[in-house]
């Protein structure tokens, strides 16, 4: 038992664990909307598109969160402009924009920063997170959770059926921008934990797992948030013993939970589907 409590004896581990849990819960809550809307690729795009903003903020001596958030919004605006002004499909537009922004970020970082800075941005460094960064994570998470908590029903309807949302008098454009802004902001927070390369996993996997376990969106929100908190907390804790990257441990654990749901989910898992097929085949 004393060996299991060793990580809690170090301040940097305690900070990493509770900050990871906060980020995981926020990403998990937002993940349900990303899954319902089908924005998995959009989450990937924004998580990579914030890299040039981080690089420019580093060069100018500004907080990383400011540069990353602005870059995320610019990337979303660029994708919307190209989609509106051309015949290019949305998936192609997202692929072009996010790779272009990501490449620009790599050029800026390699030119003006060090390899250590590049590794932190791409892979995260939750064990060495500074107090100002913790404050940024808390503020971003608080704003995101408050907005989602107040507007989750409107956002749910918008994600499920935008036309129905407009018919009921909801401002679909405002909801669209709100969701994009929250997605960009949350990507900035998650950068601290898992880096740009793995942010999309925290924004998609908990919601996808919860989607396999329930057909009710309210329950899905609680499940995805709970899984985000639990996997981030346990992953950060386990990284001490594995002596591995904290972000990698968190995302690997989330993937294992998803695979378990994918196979054993009582209604939508593989085993349940095979059981239904077998029962239908046995009926006269």
Image (tube, grey):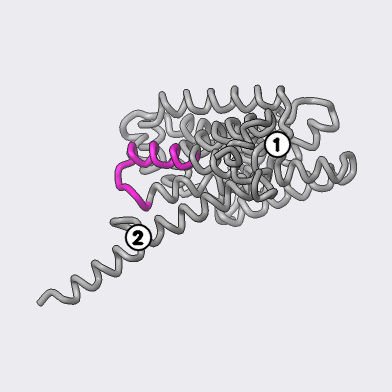
- Expressed as whole percent of the image width and height from the top left, the position of residue 44 reads 60, 48
- On screen, residue 6 versus residue 169, left or right, reads right
Q: How many marks?
A: 2
The residue at 50%/49% (across/down) is 205
Residue 239: x %, y % from top left: 64, 45
Does 9 appear above or below 120? above
**Residue 171 visible in the snapshot:** yes
Identify the residue position indicated by label 2 in the image: 269
Instruction: Name which quarter of the figure residue 195 lies in.
Output: top right
Judged from the image, the secondary structure of the residue bearing numbered disc 1 is helix
Q: Residue at x 36, y 59 (%)?
A: 264
Which quadrant of the structure image shows residue 188? top right
Mark 2: secondary structure: loop
| Nearer the observer, 23 or 112 | 23
Q: Nearer the viewer, residue 263 or 165?
A: 263
Q: For the point 47% across and 23% down, which residue is it?
A: 146
Task: Tell me the tag on residue 127.
Answer: 1
**Which comes sooner in the sequence, label 1 or label 2?**
1
Q: Residue furthest right?
A: 111
Q: Residue at x 68, y 28 (%)?
A: 11
- How many residues crowd mark 1 within 10 Å: few (<14), some (14–19), many (20+)? many
Q: Position of residue 150 (x, y in %)?
A: 41, 24
The CA distance from mark 1 to mark 2 is 36 Å
Residue 184 appears in view = no
- Magenta part of the protein: which range? 212-228
On the rendered image, what quadrant is the C terminus found in? bottom left
Answer with left or right where residue 207 lies relative to residue 18: left
């Amino acid at each position: 038992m004393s060996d299991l409590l060793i990580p809690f004896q170090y301040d940097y581990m305690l900070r990493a664990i509770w900050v990871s849990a906060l980020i995981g819960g926020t990403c998990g809550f937002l993940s349900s909307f990303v899954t319902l809307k089908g924005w998995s690729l959009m989450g990937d795009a924004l998580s990579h598109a914030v890299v040039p903003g981080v690089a420019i903020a580093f060069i100018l001596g500004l907080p990383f969160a400011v540069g990353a958030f602005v870059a995320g919004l610019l990337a979303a605006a660029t994708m919307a402009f190209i989609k509106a002004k051309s015949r290019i499909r949305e998936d192609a537009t997202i692929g072009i924009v996010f790779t272009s922004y990501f490449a620009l970020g790599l050029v800026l970082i390699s030119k003006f920063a060090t390899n250590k800075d590049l590794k932190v941005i791409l892979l995260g460094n939750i064990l060495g997170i500074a107090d100002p960064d913790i404050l940024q994570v808390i503020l971003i998470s608080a704003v995101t959770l408050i907005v989602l908590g107040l507007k989750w029903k409107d956002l749910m309807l918008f994600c499920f059926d935008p036309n129905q949302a407009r018919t009921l008098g909801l401002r679909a454009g405002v909801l669209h921008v709100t969701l994009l802004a929250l997605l960009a902001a949350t990507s900035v927070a998650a950068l601290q934990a898992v880096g740009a390369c793995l942010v999309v996993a925290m924004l998609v996997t908990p919601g996808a797992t919860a989607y396999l376990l329930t057909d009710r969106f309210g329950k899905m929100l609680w499940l995805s948030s709970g899984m985000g908190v639990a996997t981030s907390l346990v992953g950060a804790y386990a990284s001490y013993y594995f002596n591995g990257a904290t972000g990698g441990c968190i995302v690997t654990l989330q993937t294992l939970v998803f695979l378990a749901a994918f196979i054993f989910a009582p209604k939508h898992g593989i085993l349940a589907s095979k059981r239904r097929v077998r029962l239908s085949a046995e009926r006269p």
